[in-house]
Image: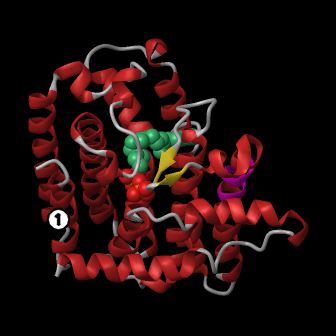
Amino acid sequence: MFSETYESYSKQIEEELVRRLPAVDTRSGILEEAMRYSLEAGGKRLRPVMLLAVCEIAGGSAEDAMPFACAMEYIHTYSLIHDDHPSMDNDDLRRGKPTNHKVYGDDMAILAGDGLLNSAFEIMLGEILHAGNDPARRERCIRAAAEIAEAAGVRGMIAGQASDCRPELVQGSGEDRLLYIHRNKTGAIIRASVRAGAILGGAGEAELEAFTTYAENVGLTFQIVDDILDVIGSIRELGKNTGMDAERGKLTYPAVYGLEYSYDRAREVTEQAVQALEQVQGSNTDFLKELAQNLLKRIS
Ligand code: GRG
């Protein structure tokens, strides 16, 4: 049941992702090709799936939330293109294919990332404009867009990436420093996906809090699992090179605490995510619980 529901959401997203992309000036055709290349290269679509699912659980419709789900995937895909760029991680494989700059060149890869990021804001602002005669929906769309903007920005993912590039400059000690990077680089947009979905679905304050705790724990599990997979996974499974974190001296759970503690921590944090959903009353949250537990399956 979980897999069918996940596939049904991701199929809807696949159908909409390119269709909703703002039209690129035809004289800049190569730009559109580069944007579509990474967008259509696959990927789990985890963030938009969570956004749509939470919106429905909170009482909204997936259709109304779709522009925000697409915006979230545009932002995530842009971040991967820039992260892979020679000026950052310099990776040649992503989603099982050559990275964007390997195919289109450094210049076009930067612009394809920029184009996707900007498209996210165009699509969300378009939705706010269209909600003109429905003040309640307009308000929800503005709040959702603000959540996403903050999480993708300099108090979220961009700050996290900056710290990941210069881990030696992050203040604090032990798990604090790790958490700071993980919370921002990976956690922020997972948290925003869930919160935006909840807001669009009309969740009340208590529900929103519960979804937020869930999302923060899922975000952390996701990153710990990603850290572990970089040590134990294979290129075939992951569609990207492995063993790179250690080579680049990245601050990761296995690097700081070893694999055993990392596994324990991932299980503990998943349990906290599942527990948080007990506070969401009157709706079936099984899909979200299974989604959290499924992340662990990647390392079991
Ligand atoms: C360039 C501003 C900027 C940010 C980059 C996302 C990110 C920040 C860096 C990616 C580096 C990385 C491998 C982080 C680990 C977690 C992560 C985000 C993995 C990729 O996400 P998945 O597994 O990918 O959801 P798919 O391909 O399934 O969408």
Q: Residues within 10 Å of mark 1 (few under 14, many from 20)?
A: many
User: Which image quadrant is residue 134 in?
Assistant: bottom right
Secondary structure mostly seen in the magenta stretch = helix
Residue in view at x 43 percent, y 67 percent: 48
Nearer to me, 173 or 300: 300
Can the viewer see residue 245? yes
Residue in view at x 25 percent, y 22 percent: 255
Q: Is residue 298 magenta?
A: no
Nearer to me, 252 or 200: 252
In x, y percent, where is residue 184? Answer: 43, 38
Residue picked out by circle 1: 289
- Compared with 147, 124 (above or below) is below
Q: Is residue 106 left or right of residue 249?
A: right
Residue in view at x 38 percent, y 70 percent: 49
Q: Is residue 51 left or right of residue 225?
A: right
Q: Is residue 166 left or right of residue 228?
A: right
Say which element carries label 1.
helix
In x, y percent, where is residue 256? Answer: 24, 19
In x, y percent, where is residue 274? Answer: 14, 58
| Quadrant occupied by the N terminus | bottom left
User: Which image quadrant is residue 31 in?
Assistant: bottom right
In x, y percent, where is residue 89? Answer: 52, 32
Q: Residue furthest right?
A: 27
- Compared with 227, 72 (above or below) is below
Q: What span is colored magenta in the figure?
A: 111-116
Q: Amino acid at mark 1?
A: Lys
